[in-house]
Image (cartoon, rainbow, N blue to C red):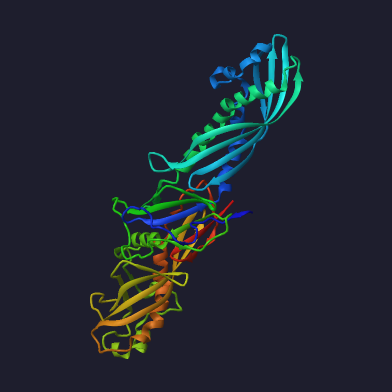
Amino acid sequence: MLKIWAILLFGGLLTPSQGLDGAAQVLSRVNPNVLGKIIADLLHRGDILNSVLGPVSAGNGGLLNLGNLLDTGLTGLEIKKLTLPKVSLKLLPGVGVQLNVYTQVLIEGKGLVGKVLNLQVDVNITTRARLAQDNKGAPKLIIEDCKTQLVNVRILLNVLRLRPALLNKNLGNLFPGVLCPLIDTVLDDTVNPLLSTVNSVVPLGVVGDLQYTLANLPVVSDAGITLDLNAVVEDLLGNKVDDPACSAATISLPSMVASSSRLGLSVCLLSSVLKLLLAPQNLSTDIAAQMLPSDIPLTASVLRALIPEVSKLLPESQQPLLKIRVLETPAVSVKNGKVTVRLPASIEVSPSALPQQSLFVLGADIVLGVQPTISDNKLRISVALERVGLRLASSLISNFNVARLGPLISDILNAVYVPLLNDALGVEIPLPNLLNLNWENGLVKVINNALLVNALA
C-alpha cells in the first residue's frame, strides 16, 4: 500500500496559531496528490460525466456560441461521449491550485438530412482556484478562471464539408460554457463540502467534546497545503478544559520530503484530554488484599516484615487497606521523545477492620509513561507505570525507611491501579477529517512536542 506520509509543517518553528483561548495546535500539510485523486475519482463517476451529455442548448451558452456554423445547414450539436479524464493538480504558492483536466469529447452534428457531422475532440480544461475560507471559517476552493484549449480535432464525418478552421473557432467558443461548469459542479457540490468537514465537533466518549476549527487561512506552498487548526476540549457543561502550564503552544517538526502528508497534534491537546479524563475525584480508590493476585500478597505478615515498627498496631489477624487519593490534576511533560504523566497522590495504610485509623500516610509521585496509538482514525491513550517516588507524610509509628515499601507499592499499582487508569483512558479521540485521509495504525512518534501521525493512501 502506498504511504502518503502526512505532515504538519515545513520544519523549524511555525508562527503560533491565531487560536482560541485554551486551544491546542493541530497542524497538517496535505500532499496535493490527495486532492488531485479526489477530483479525478469524481470526474470518473458516470453521473458526473453524463451530466454534460446531450444536445448543446442555449442554457449553457452553446447555441449562442456556434456563430455562423448554423448558417451552413447544421441545425444542432450533441455531445455523445466524454472519455475518462486525465487529471493533474499543481499548487500555486500563496494562491491555491491549478487543475488541468484532459479529456476526449465525441460530438455529433445534425442537419435537415440527419447526422452530418461527427468529431472527436481532444480538449484540455485549465482551472485556477483560490484557497480561501467560507463564512463558517472552513477551507474552500473558489474558481477564479477557467479556460479550455483544443488539443486536436479529428473529423470523422463531414457531410457539409465544413472548413476545419471554422470548426476549430466555433468549438473553441463552445467548450468553456459546456465543460467549465462541470469543474464548478465538482468543486462546489463535493470537494468544498468535504473540505468543510475540517471544522467539526466530535464526542470524547460521554465525558465531553473536542472541537476542531481552522485557525488561519490555509497556506499553499510548493510542499503542500498546510492547515493550522485549533483543538478545544470541553466538558459536558461546555467548559473549556486546558492545561495552562503546557508550554508546547507552537509545534516544531522536522522537514519532510515534498511528497509527504502528515498530521501533528500538540502535546497540549493530549494534556487537556488527560486533564478531563483523569480528574482527581475520579481516581481515588481503596485497594484490599482480595483485589490482588496471589503473587502480590498484601497481608499483615508481609507489612510487618518490611516495617517491624508497625507490628504493635497491625496484628496478624488484620489485613492492610491502601487508600489512594490523587491530590492534583495530572502534569504532562515531554522529554527525549517520551510523554510522561505525573500524578501527585497520597497512599494511606489502615487496618481493614478499622479503615478510619491511619497507620501511616505516604506522599507519592506516580510517574506514568504515555503510549499513544492510532486505530481506526482515532487516537488511543494508555499508560504504564515508570516509577513511584515515596516519602513519609505522617505516621502513628516512629519514622521508618520508606524505600522498603517501594517494590510492594509498585507491584500493587501495576496490578490494580494502572488498569483503573487505563479504563478511565478508554475514550477514543477522533482525529480531524482531512480530505478523508486514513491514518496509519500503530504507535505514534513524539517529536518536538508534537504527536506525529502518518497517513495512508
Residue positioned most to the front: 165
Q: Is residue 301 visible?
A: no
Residue positioned most to the top: 112
Quarter of the image for residue 328 reads bottom left
Q: Nearer the viewer, residue 413 or 163?
A: 163
Residue 172 horizontal/vertical position (percent): 63, 26
Q: Is residue 71 visible?
A: yes
Q: Nearer the viewer, residue 284 or 155?
A: 155
Rendered view: 264 above or below 50: below
For the image, the number of numbered tags is: 0
Residue 303 horizontal/vertical position (percent): 35, 85
- Residue at image coords 56%, 41%: 98
Relative to 413, is 86 on the left or the right?
A: right
Relative to 242, is 198 on the left or the right?
A: right
- Residue at image coords 29%, 64%: 281
Rendered view: 95 above or below 151: below
Q: Nearer the viewer, residue 227 or 443?
A: 227
Relative to 388, is 46 on the left or the right?
A: right
Residue 190 horizontal/vertical position (percent): 51, 37
Residue 97 horizontal/vertical position (percent): 53, 43
Q: Quadrant of the N terminus?
A: bottom right
Quarter of the image for residue 278 reads bottom left
